[in-house]
Image: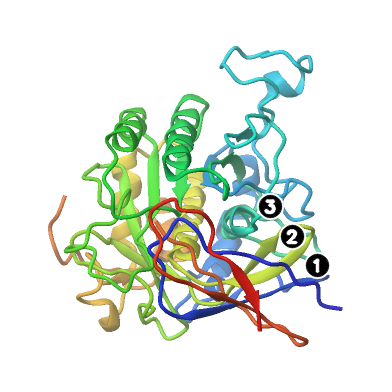
Amino acid sequence: MLKFKQLSVFGVVALPCLFAVSAFAGQASQSSWGHQSQYGVDAVKAWSIVKNKCADSGVVVAVIDTGIDANHPDLKGSLWVNKKELNGKAGIDDDGNGFIDDVNGWDFVTHGGKLVDTHGHGTHIAGIIGAKASSESGYSGVCPGVQIMSLRYYDAKASGVQNLKNTVSAIEYAVNNGANIINYSGGGAEFSRAEMLALKKAEEKGILVFAAAGNERSNADVNLYFPAAYDLTNMLSITAVNQAGQVLPSSNWGVQKVQLAAPGNSILSTLPGGSYGFMTGTSQATAFVSGIAAMMLSVKKDLSVAQLKSKLTESAIRYKQLVGKTQFGAEANALAAVSTVLGISGAPAVAKKRVSTNRSFAATSSGRKKTIRLKSKPALRYQKSLAVSER
């Protein structure tokens, strides 16, 4: 029996089109097309090299999003653990970081340490990055078992100003509490000095940040999209491709402000309540590349941000349909990236740099019994969720 969830699109300059959304309960395949070789990121082949290193490396990926379902069977073993708080006293800030009982991260909406995701987007993103399936069923992310630090910033009932404030606080938390990578799939057209300064702190701390290129059907070199457009050395902007390796019609592109592409069309991943479902957008593409970077750090944790960026971009696979769409005209590839880090020969042909240069969510899926459709309309950055309607 299919179990459907109502999801909504938020934080976007939204698209004038419909997105179908569905979720289902029960078993899921171990991976999505995005994990495979044909225009996917080759994660399945990379697993044979990395083995259990993702789960054992101690690499921490901060997911700044709508929260995470901490009880999902494929995610509960992939959560970052603040050991001082776990082993401390309830109601006490045992590690002195200013947050009480932040065992797995922090909810900047409820101001507490209990992880929730009433939307589903954050759980989906976390699954792509680091879900770890059992041997019989479930779903595995790109870097299975990597530590996910859940940082919820988005509140559908809050003002845009408050959600932006939450974002800045989440970035600062990640910087101060041991994150190696930050995945942030939101954004918009407005520059925020506070957000940029928080990301600057991440740059100074040596934290790599992956930001979604956006879903506005726009040239990001002309119509800047933040935070992806901030001129910081620790950031990479990611756009989304379909199963033919083509940039999605909904996705932003740019040879200066968008560095790489990754799978983003009808991506299977985890959803709240032990469910699985499909979503589409640059959010999902960004999560794939965060997972690849986590895999790279898992096999060689002393890589600097500069080394991570160079090896990730140099190992990306060049496709003619991406030339003129991203800086490198290429799609990130887990097998090639890990092989490059480890000096393994015989990896897929790598891309060459094309141009020297120094937020929006979308979801899609279909079910057998009915579909829930999202109709998007123009929205401001961090605006309230767009309504879901059944048809």
Q: Is residue 312 above or below residue 160?
A: below
Q: Which residue is mark 1?
A: 137
Residue found 18% across the figure and 61% down from its top = 256
Answer with left or right where residue 250 lies relative to residue 46: left
Q: Which residue is mark 2?
A: 133
The three-letter code of the residue at mark 3 reads Thr
Q: Find numbered disc 2 in the image and state the secondary structure of the residue it sits on.
A: loop
Split into 4 quadrants, where in the image is the C terminus? bottom right
Q: Is residue 81 above or below residue 260?
A: above
Distance CA(mark 3)–CA(mark 1)? 24 Å
Q: Is residue 359 above or below residue 200?
A: below
Looking at the image, tell me whether mark 3 or mark 1 is earlier in sequence order.
3
Q: Nearer the viewer, mark 3 or mark 1?
A: 3
Residue found 27% across the figure and 35% down from its top = 193
Picture coordinates of residue 374, whole percent (x, y): 57, 74
Q: Is residue 31 visible?
A: no
Split into 4 quadrants, where in the image is the N terminus? bottom right
Q: Find numbered disc 3 in the image and state the secondary structure of the residue it sits on.
A: loop
Distance CA(mark 2)–CA(mark 1)? 6 Å
Picture coordinates of residue 136, whole percent (x, y): 83, 67
The three-letter code of the residue at mark 1 reads Ser
Q: Nearer the viewer, mark 3 or mark 2?
A: 3
Q: Is residue 285 visible?
A: yes
Picture coordinates of residue 88, whole percent (x, y): 76, 15
Q: Which residue is mark 3?
A: 118
The three-letter code of the residue at mark 2 reads Ala
Label 3 Cα neighbours within 10 Å, binned few <14 / some 14-19 / many ≥20: some
Verify CB contact (< 8 Å) between mark 2 and mark 1.
yes
Residue found 19% across the figure and 75% down from its top = 324
